[in-house]
Amino acid sequence: MNPNRILFLLLVTWYSFAQQKDVASLNYEQLKPLLFQKSERVQVINFWATWCAPCIKELPYFEKLNQRDDVEVLLVSLDFPKHKQKRLLPFIEKYKIRSKVVHLDDANETFWINQISTKWSGALPATLIYNNNRRGFYEQSFTKEELYAEVNSYF
Amino acid sequence: MKIIFLNLSFLFLIILNDSVPGVAYQIGDVATDFSLPNVDGKMVSLSDFADAKGFIVIFTCNTCPYSVAYEERIIALDKKYSEEGYPVIAINPNDPAAIDGDELSDMKVRAEEKGFTFPYIQDVGQQIYPQYGATKTPHVFVLQKDGTDNIVRYIGAIDDSSRSPKEVKKRYVEQAVDALLAGKSPTTTKTKAIGCSIKTL
């Protein structure tokens, strides 16, 4: 293998790593389009935080779900803004999270919690599942079986 | 006529189910009293507070970062309002078997460390929080005494900035209690904030 090729591979590796680590901080208006996508795939939006133990427990189920071609998973972190660098990014790297992650940084909680679902009290974990025909909001923890059954009910 | 009535009641049930999971207090409901163990070893009931005009009931815990972020502000609320007749009553709804750090002994340590000036009681057997309809920590219910009843006047967040005390613009609980002390109804009666789900087995 010539040195140029090694350098190229290193660059690619570094780039994909940097990509994974780059988590956008969004306000609600910026997040909103991701909650109303027109897609053939079922959209699964999980609201979580690194400090939320039941969220961490169910995270692998969402990661597994994200491997399916007919499902798209988005993990919306509600970590405190001051913890994004110190906790959120290291967490994503340590557990090699493959699903798309964004960080919701918007102080107007009463407004956007009701916008996302009037059923949501604000407790974490919480999950939004939708496709072009149906939307469902779940303020609960899932077992793997429950999550798969719920997502499959959208097909 | 009977069919119409049945249809209407069915519709009503659907609406109820859609707005709240299970039964939860709405503004104007009578809140239940309780007898729960405090960090000082005594039992606490709302009826113990003969001179109170009402209560700031806060479901909170040791282990939720949002609860911890609000500890100083909860102490400040009690200091400001207990003498005016609205003491803070903090209730830990978590089942200690479901999470490390929320045993009564852990609560005692935290109350002493932080110098809690209010009761910090344990919802033993998780019997009380479901009746209130608390879903998370922290979750506030401002009650106003009416004879022997305690009427729910405000449900929601302490203020509009869980992240930073410096960025608070609206002090929801203070606005509600100030209104009640002035003989008025609170203008904002329901708010929402991110919190930790209540931990049960």
Image (cartoon, coloured by chain):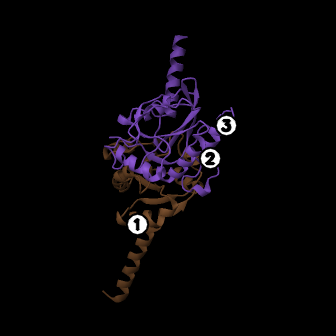
- The alpha-carbon separation of the residues under discs 1 and 3 comes to 46 Å
State how far apart marks 2 and 3 are (Cα). Answer: 12 Å
Query: Where is the N terminus of chain B found, in terms of image quarters?
Result: top right
Residue B171 at least partly seen:
yes
The chain coloured purple is B
Q: Which amino acid does the dot numbered 1 rest on?
A: Pro
Q: Name the residue under label 2.
A: B171
> How far is disc 2 from disc 1 in space, using C-alphas?
34 Å
Q: What residue type is labelled 2?
A: Arg
SS class, disc 2: loop
Which marked residue is nearer to the observer: mark 1 or mark 3?
3
- Percent position of residue B65, x then y: 45, 53
Q: Mark 3 points at which residue?
A: B179
- Mark 3 is surrounded, within 10 Å at the Cα level, by few (under 14), some (14 to 19) or many (20 or more) other residues, namely some
Tell me the quarter of the image containing the C terminus of chain B.
top left
On the image, the x and y values in percent for residue B144 come to 58, 31
Task: Give whichever of A137, B192 is nearer the camera.
Answer: B192
Q: Are marks 2 and 3 in contact (CB under 8 Å)?
A: no
Q: Mark 1 — residue?
A: A90
Asked if residue A82 is positioned above or below residue B192 in the image, the reply reads below
Can you name the residue that lies furthest to the top here?
A: B1
- The picture's colour for chain A is brown
Q: Residue A130: x percent and y percent?
A: 47, 45
